Image (cartoon, rainbow, N blue to C red):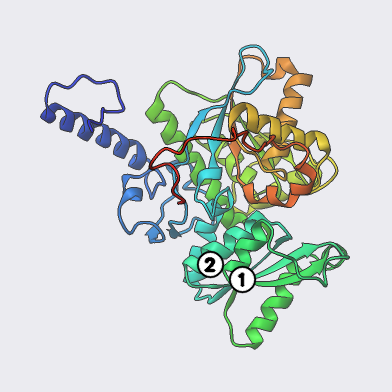
């Protein structure tokens, strides 16, 4: 089969084609390495053995003054993640929405969490840890991603999962993220929402850490969502990746970046990176749990830890999109997830990107002049497995089915009746 070059370049022989491809590769290499340091978009990402490898890391030049710059990172995700136009209905006049598919960062690790874990688990290994501890909700994408990444690196994983008071003493089942975690052999400790609220995630993790230390283990604690100052580097690096993608395309510039916010690390990295880099896009975050002021304060703590000297209110706009509460959905929100999937082929999760996209389009409808004529990049942060926890609520929304109508006598054709 003859494979045509992806770029519209006329070639009259094999030699010009090779020269052209070499030039393209050089341009990609220059774009990927011109800003010093390991880049997810580097050609090295395609080399055999590069996945799961430990690599030296140098920050982008525009972030070199920040504190806590890591010296190494692990290659855990499949980067760069693609960007394409998202043909959403009923947009304001002249508005374009594009989508960055961080949901495609890896099947088991899909989503934004893997970017943070590349840095956090590198630190865990550097400190000689033999296990990791993290905390989250019963269907936490972060906990699932941590369990996968830990197993990749031969670390045991301990998960403290928050559930309802009625279910805390019962087998949590094998739905969604729980199925993956339990297949991987993660150690799961359940706490009720009331216990979680009273004790807090930090104290719960410390309690388990001390027990493991007494057993002779070497635990490393990863905060909720992987959102601390070190984890923030994951989305600072994502901004460098985005810069390179824009440089290679040459004809797309984004005015706005939109993302759902659940723990703060993703928006801290995106907002800080956008402010310091060549992007200059305005970052909008839609919070799916706590109120905006909580996240302004939390993001401030993260960027203060990096000694950025910036004010969170100046680099990100945070709006409330939590609705009924974290991981709780209205019928209208779930219908929106279904309608967007049917209309565009993009499956949003119900906890993060589903609520974020729903709130974005609502804001566009309510304030069209704010978005008119702008190019918007929506970051899909993954979480598909969370849909399995909503099966009962979504059953009435799912596509129809029917038994195939067969005539009484349908002649068999050879080669079509085998069972595979």
Q: Report the disc number at residue 160.
A: none
**Residue lying furthest top:** 93
Q: Name the image quarter holding residue 36.
A: top left
Q: Position of residue 85 (x, y in %)?
A: 53, 25
Q: Secondary structure at mark 2?
A: helix
Q: Residue at x 62, y 17 (%)?
A: 95
Identify residue for label 1. Answer: 186
Height in image: 301 above or below 187? above
**Residue lying furthest bottom:** 215
Q: How far apart in space, not on screen, are marks 2 and 1 (Cα)?
A: 9 Å
Q: Report the disc number at residue 150.
A: 2
Mark 2 or mark 1, which has the lower sequence index? 2
Image quadrant occupied by the N terminus? top left
Q: Is residue 203 left or right of residue 34?
A: right
Residue 62 in view, yes or no: yes
Q: How many marks?
A: 2
Q: Nearer the viewer, residue 312 or 338?
A: 338
Viewer-nearest of discs 2 and 1: 1
Q: Secondary structure at mark 1?
A: loop
Q: Nearer the viewer, residue 357 or 242?
A: 357
Q: Residue at x 58, y 45 (%)?
A: 269
Q: Residues within 10 Å of mark 2 (few under 14, many from 20)?
A: many
Height in image: 11 above or below 110? above
Q: Residue at x 80, y 62 (%)?
A: 163
Q: Is residue 268 left or right of residue 70?
A: right
Q: Are marks 2 and 1 in contact (CB under 8 Å)?
A: yes
């Amino acid at each position: 089969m003859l494979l045509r070059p992806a770029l519209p370049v006329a070639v009259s022989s094999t030699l010009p084609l090779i020269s052209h491809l070499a030039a393209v590769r050089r341009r990609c290499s220059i774009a990927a390495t011109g800003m010093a340091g390991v880049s997810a978009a580097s050609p090295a990402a395609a080399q055999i053995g590069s996945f799961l490898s430990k690599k030296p890391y140098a920050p982008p030049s525009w972030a070199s003054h920040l504190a806590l710059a890591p010296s190494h990172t692990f290659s855990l995700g499949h980067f760069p993640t693609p960007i394409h136009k998202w043909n959403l209905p009923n947009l304001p006049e002249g508005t374009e929405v594009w989508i960055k598919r961080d949901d495609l960062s890896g099947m088991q690790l899909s989503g934004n969490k893997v970017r943070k874990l590349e840095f956090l688990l590198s630190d865990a290994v550097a400190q000689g840890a033999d296990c990791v501890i993290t905390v989250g909700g019963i269907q936490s994408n972060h906990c699932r991603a941590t369990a996968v990444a830990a197993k990749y690196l031969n670390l045991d994983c301990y998960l403290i999962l928050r559930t309802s008071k009625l279910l805390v003493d019962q087998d949590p089942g094998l739905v969604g993220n729980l199925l993956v975690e339990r297949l991987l052999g993660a150690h799961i400790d359940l706490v009720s929402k009331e216990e979680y609220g009273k004790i807090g995630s930090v104290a719960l993790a410390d309690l388990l850490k001390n027990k493991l230390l007494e057993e002779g283990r070497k635990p490393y604690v990863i905060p909720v969502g992987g959102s601390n100052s070190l984890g923030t580097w994951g989305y600072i690096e994502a901004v460098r990746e985005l810069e390179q993608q824009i440089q290679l395309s040459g004809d797309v510039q984004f005015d706005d970046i939109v993302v759902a916010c659940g723990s703060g690390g993703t928006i801290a990295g995106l907002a800080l990176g956008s402010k310091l880099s060549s992007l200059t896009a305005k970052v909008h975050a839609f919070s799916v749990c706590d109120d905006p002021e909580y996240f302004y304060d939390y993001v401030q703590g993260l960027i203060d830890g990096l000694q950025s000297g910036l004010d969170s209110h100046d680099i990100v706009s945070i709006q409330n999109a939590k609705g009924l509460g974290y991981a709780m959905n209205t019928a209208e929100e779930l219908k929106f997830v279904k309608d967007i999937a049917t209309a565009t082929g993009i499956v949003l999760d119900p906890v993060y990107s589903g609520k974020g996209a729903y709130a974005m389009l609502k804001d566009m409808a309510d304030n069209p002049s704010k978005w008119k004529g702008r190019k918007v990049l929506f970051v899909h942060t993954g979480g598909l497995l969370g849909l399995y926890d909503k099966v009962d609520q979504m059953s009435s929304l799912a596509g129809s089915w029917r038994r195939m109508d067969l005539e009484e006598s349908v002649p068999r054709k050879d080669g079509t009746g085998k069972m595979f």
